[in-house]
Image: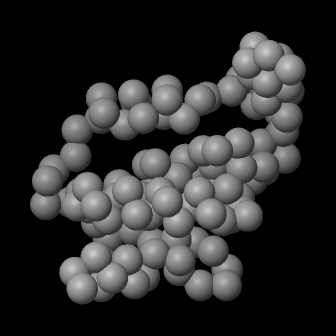
Amino acid sequence: MSISDNIANEAVRPCPHCGQGSGFFVSPEKIAEMLREIPISPNLAAEEAVFNKRLEECGKCDSLREQVLCFHCGCFVMFRARPHKSHCPHPRGDRWKDIEIKLVK
């Protein structure tokens, strides 16, 4: 299957959060590009290491859909992981809660 076939298949899948058809696919690269274009105050943003570790945790989660969406809240995980005062919405507990503690050690 080619990349364009994958994109076409992704485009017809319903939204994993609401079940509605979206009619388009947004790649992880496009979301990263959009994230770079939206400024955030440094005192509101998570440190780069924390942001990257949060995304790493999302990548291991069975609730990550289409490489970009959280099944539990329907958000783009890159946007949710960016603010310092954010949390993982997983119903079995916040998968990010100890990330800063582990990075400091």
- Count of numbered badges drawn on the protein: 0
Direction from residue 31 to residue 51 in the image, left or right = left
Using the image as rendered, state which of residue 88 and residue 29 is in the foreground. Answer: 29
Where, by quadrant of the figure, is residue 3 drawn? top right
Name the image quarter holding residue 82: bottom left
User: Quick one: 22 or 104, which is closer to the camera?
Assistant: 104
Q: Left of 7 or right of it: where is 82?
A: left
Q: What residue lies at 57% left-to-right and 51% top-to-bottom?
A: 75
Q: In the rendering, at what x and y percent does residue 56 appear?
A: 49, 60
Q: Residue at x 84, y 39 (%)?
A: 14
Does the image show residue 59?
Answer: yes
Instruction: From this view, report whether residue 2 is shown above or below residue 77.
Output: above
In the picture, which quadrant includes the N terminus?
top right
Q: How is the image coloured?
A: one colour
Percent position of residue 66, x then y = 71, 42
Q: Quadrant of the C terminus?
A: bottom left
Q: Nearer the viewer, residue 100 or 45?
A: 100
The residue positioned 53% from the left and 66% from the top of the image is 57
Residue 73 appears in the figure: no
Asked if residue 85 is positioned above or below residue 52 in the image, the reply reads below
| Residue drawn at the location 28% of the way across and 61% of the way down | 49
Q: x%, y% of residue 69? A: 63, 49
